[in-house]
Amino acid sequence: MESERDKFAFEQGPIRPPSEAYSLLIRATRNCTWNKCAFCHTYKGKRFEKRSVQEVKADIQAAKDIADEIKALSWRSGYGGEITREVVEATFSLYDEHFRSIALWLYFGGKHVFLQDANSIVLKTSELIEILKFLKDKFPHVERVTSYGRSSTIAKRKSVEELKELKEAGLTRLHVGLESGWDFLLEYMNKGVTAAEHIKAGKKVMESSIELSEYVILGLGGRRWWREHALETAKVLNQVSPHFIRLRTLKVLPQMPLQKKIDEGDFVLQTEEEMIVEERLLIESLNGINSTFLSDHILNLLMEVEGKLPKEKEKMLKIIDAFLALPPEEKLNFRLGKRAGIYNTMEDMSDTLLHRKVEELVERLKVEAPGGVEEAISKIKETFL
């Protein structure tokens, strides 16, 4: 018999894209179907599992029950069913994390849903359609439903017709980890996909009218292969022309398989400045496409490098050139200020008080921090993963 606690509980996975920060997270699968990438640590040591349709629908129903309870709380509190700041704060003091997550979702509009975990598109199309229809039935106001999907899965297991059926059922966007478009690097990083499969999958998604977000990892080629990584990745993107190109910056943690390659001297990390040079080459090489380029992750140094291609390419390149033209001490000032949360963009450096604050921090870290400023920056970046 279902307990009252079980009625108001649903399962959530560990991650979601930054663009899904205010989305309801519904776990359709557990962990990753591949789980062998050298640059990823998220699901290592965990087995992939498909959740049953009934399990997923039960979670959606639990989310609906919680949403109804929160709206009832709003009425009882005199807010007429509106999810106000006061209602959200009340859930934080009266209820558990399930209530808090739904309250925040409703507060921010309650219109976006993300299906977890790493490759939920692997579920049978009929199962996904059943989940999507149930979701829309319970939450008819939802406007966007998204999921991660591996290129190899889409290329080999989903037809354009199936993707169109998923679109019709309510799937509006797929997040795909392109990472690189260079076959050598894809194999070196054990990505389990080829450039040709990336292109095939991307074109299928675009033909289906589902929105496509392709993710590129800056720095994945290291010092030896950065140029090939940038150029070959641009070639793939130029053939797909996805709706969104989302940039990520490589940060290696000890538990990642890539760390062993670094320890053995086989892979050499780039400096942040070298990665920005790589970013410039990537953007410069994107031609003939209509995509929105986004730097929407805190690990990216120049998060202001965003824009619509091709219209805003020159604007983005000018931002990069402005950083590269800075004297070494000013580059260091910006890098630390950005990582420490003092700066958001390079324009913030023109604030005399902020600039001086970072200068003082630089001098203090040179003396006090083990490994100096660079090690301090590295440690801050680790907290972003």
Image (cartoon, grey):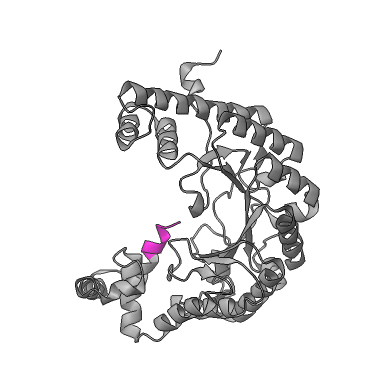
Residue under the image location 58 percent in, 76 percent down: 282
Left or right of 351, for residue 298: right
Work out which residue is located at the far front of the displayed protein and give it. 80
Task: From this view, report whether residue 221 is shown above or below residue 326.
Answer: above
Q: x%, y% of residue 124?
A: 75, 39
Pick the front one: 23 or 382 = 23
Q: Quadrant of residue 283?
A: bottom right
Task: From this view, report whether residue 116 is shown above or below residue 67.
Answer: below
Q: Magenta segment, which residues? A: 379-385
Pick the front one: 287 or 119 = 287
Left or right of 199, for residue 230: left
Pick the front one: 68 or 92 = 68
Count of marks, rendered view: 0
Task: From this view, report whether residue 168 is shown above or below residue 327.
Answer: above
Q: Quadrant of residue 357?
A: bottom left
Task: From this view, report whether residue 274 is shown above or below residue 342.
Answer: below
Q: Quadrant of residue 168?
A: top right
Q: x%, y% of residue 146?
A: 60, 47
Evaluate whether residue 215 shows in this view: yes
Q: x%, y% of residue 61?
A: 56, 26
Q: Is residue 233 magenta?
A: no
Q: x%, y% of residue 138?
A: 57, 29
Left or right of 291, for residue 152: right
Evaluate whether residue 159 shows in this view: no
Q: Quadrant of the N terminus?
A: top right
Q: Quadrant of the C terminus?
A: bottom left
Left or right of 383, for residue 124: right
Residue under the image location 42 percent in, 42 percent down: 108
